[in-house]
Amino acid sequence: MKQSRKDFLKMAGLAGVGITGMVGSTSTKQEQLSGAGSIQGLENSDYKQQFNMMGYAAPALDQVRIGVIGTGSRGRSNTGRFARIEGVEIRALCDLREEAVQQALEGLKEISTSINPEIYTGSEDVWREMCDRDDLDLVIINTPWHLHAPQAIYAMDKGKHAATEIPAAQTIEDCWKLVETSERTRKHCFQMTNVCYGSFEMVTLNMARKGFFGQVIHGEGAYIHQLMRQKFSRTQYQDMWRLRENASRNGNLYPHHGLGTVAQIMDINHGDSMDFMVSVSSNDFMMRDKAEELAETDSFFEKFTDSSFRGNMNTSIIRTKRGRTIMLQHDVSSPRPYSRLHLVSGTKAVARTYPEPQISNYEEGGWFSENLFKKVEEQYTPEITRRVGEEARRVGGHGGMDAILAWRLIDCLRNGIPLDMNVYDAALWSAVIPLSEWSVANEGRSVSFPDFTSGHWKTNKPGMDIQLEKGGTTRFL
């Protein structure tokens, strides 16, 4: 069934409030299921691409002048990493809470006493004032999830490149708005998916590109992270936004860590595309009980005792246009060891990480010995890791992956070369969130992905430049 984008959004209930709007309490289960067929087959859209941002190189910037929105824990650490990169000027800091901005400012002063950004704080819309400045090139967004898309869109409309923490968007409508705005303004929308710069993840990407796996058949990724204490803490997240997300949405709310690298290995948006997905969630066996337990001594939590908490474990399966499959899992409540499951399976070999990196191929007939593993890992370590890996580990952030991401973004902007990840990646990877919610609400029915590239995925050249064929000239300070 061919549908226009407008009809798709209307029938699926995706416009404005997102997919969850179609599965409210006023709908019967049969009514919800009857819409399942309407979502299938989104092969074409009435959207006409204004400009192909894939491979786009914005004019080079000798100095990258940065404004930061959100200076909580994540925002402070991100700001410090960018401040340690050649050619960066931190011009402005913005946060609702003045104490958060002051803490970020103190951290910057420890790096260099010459860093003297202007401060924006005190109101929920003060970030707009910062974006209105005419002396910023890049806005870094480290705010709660629901603010990422509107802040990135506003920044691009004001002539700034936008780099946002994940996810870039939470509704299909916002995914389209990001694409439309980036194409219209020719400003980058960069989703800061740090795991794509993980050392072993980049090794497996290089292995895939050099044919080690043969034809890639299947990939797996996950974000399994016990966050019960943090989510139910009154001080961990501003206004407990992360608990509120888990108390109102049921699906894979954080797919990027597992999905990003697998998508790059499969050349998603660069020769292949996501076709459709199915998603199921377990019941919630823990979060409501925790809310009820806390409510006995703290009335604040009473508001959460009637919440429809997401299931503890969500499992989603994606099939690509070329017939490969991706399995994603998301669990932030069960008492399981941390895992960013990363598995690549091909016709000749397989690699995985967590609990530890391993490689196998048909010739060896089992997991490689430690010596053979190190030999193969060394052989396929890409140039980006060799060039800046050690310095990135010194700067820090999840073993250096955060620092490499920040360095590479600035390096691309200063050299006027395409970014490793662009707005189409941001939109497609983020679309998993609302589509998984729809599938969960409709008993695991399949749902098709929009084509944010307007068909250009068939001819786009490979993405992430891990061999530094261009750029690589910027230094850490």
Image: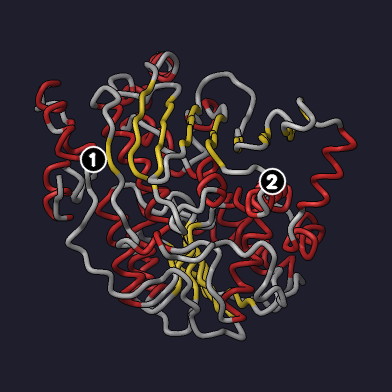
Identify the secondary structure beneath mark 1: helix
Q: Nearer the viewer, residue 228 or 403?
A: 403
Q: Nearer the viewer, residue 244 or 124?
A: 244
Residue displayed at 48% across by 30% down: 330
In the rendering, at what x and y percent does residue 461 appear?
A: 50, 66
Mark 2 and mark 1 in contact (Cβ < 8 Å)? Answer: no
Q: Which residue is mark 2?
A: 212
> Left of 388 or right of it: where is 1?
left
In the rendering, at what x and y percent does residue 12 appear?
A: 17, 41
In this figure, what is the number of numbered marks? 2
Rendered image: mark on residue 19: 1
Identify the amino acid type marked 1: Ile
Q: The C terminus is located in which quarter?
A: bottom right
Q: Nearer the viewer, residue 408 or 51?
A: 51
Identify the amino acid type marked 2: Phe
Answer few, some or many: residues within 10 Å of disc 2's Cα (few below 14, many 20 plus, some between 14 and 19).
some
Rendered image quadrant of residue 338: top right
Residue displayed at 41% across by 80% down: 133
In the rendering, at what x and y percent does residue 351 appear?
A: 68, 36
Placement of 119 over or under 286, stated as above or below = below
Placement of 363 over or under 6, stated as above or below = above
